[in-house]
Image (cartoon, rainbow, N blue to C red):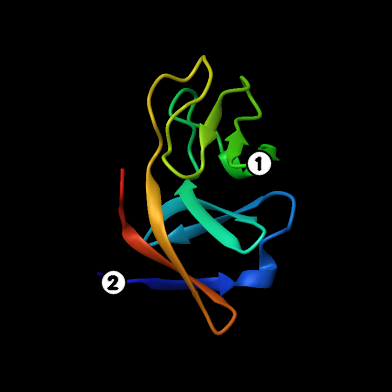
Amino acid sequence: MSFVKVCPVDKIPAEGAIAVEVDDTPVALVRRDDTVYAVSDLCSHAEVSLSEGEVYDTTIECWLHGSCFDLRTGRPVNPPATQPIATYRVKVEDGFVYVSPDSEG
């Protein structure tokens, strides 16, 4: 499995998300304590940037219609979204975040 070096881990805000590109794919990175999550940056309901929304525990909220997605599985936890978003494998080494361009789900 290949990984792409994306950014320093400290570039990801402690309370929020950032948008990055991994092999031309828009990805939202979220840091919760010592864990970094990588999910599709596009809401499956309205195709707007999820990284512009709020992060609550292990969910990210779409700012347009309020759908929340589980950062671990990509599954929506409330409507109006009914389809999951892609999740990506992440590793952190020497202070940098690496993301696999192959989605897990």
Residue 47: horizontal and vertical position, in percent? 48, 31
Where's the C terminus, which quadrant? top left
x, y percent for residue 3 = 35, 71
* Residue 98 rendering spot, x and y as whole percentages: 45, 71
Cα–Cα gap, marks 2 and 1: 28 Å
Q: Is residue 8 above or below residue 72?
A: below
On screen, residue 61 versus residue 37, left or right, reads right
**First reached walking from the N terminus: tag 2 or tag 1:** 2
Q: Quadrant of the N terminus?
A: bottom left
What residue is shown with label 1? 57
Residue at position x 57%, y 23% from top? 67
* Most foreground residue, 24 or 81: 81
In the image shown, does 54 or 64 lie closer to the viewer?
Answer: 54
- Which residue does the image show at 41% across and 36% down from the upper left? 85
Mark 2 and mark 1 residues within 8 Å of each other at the beta carbon: no
Position of 50 compared to 105: left or right?
right
**Mark whose residue sits in front, 2 or 1:** 1
Report the amino acid beneath label 2. Ser
Compared with 58, 17 (above or below) is below
Q: Is residue 15 left or right of residue 94?
A: right
Using residue 61 as the reference point, say whether residue 102 is left or right of it. left
Observer-nearest residue: 72 or 12? Answer: 72
**Residue 91's mark?**
none
Judged from this view, the residue extending furthest toward the top is 80
Q: Secondary structure at mark 1?
A: loop
Residue at image point 37% right, 42% down: 86
Question: Which residue carries the number 2 mark?
Answer: 2
At label 1, the amino acid type is Asp
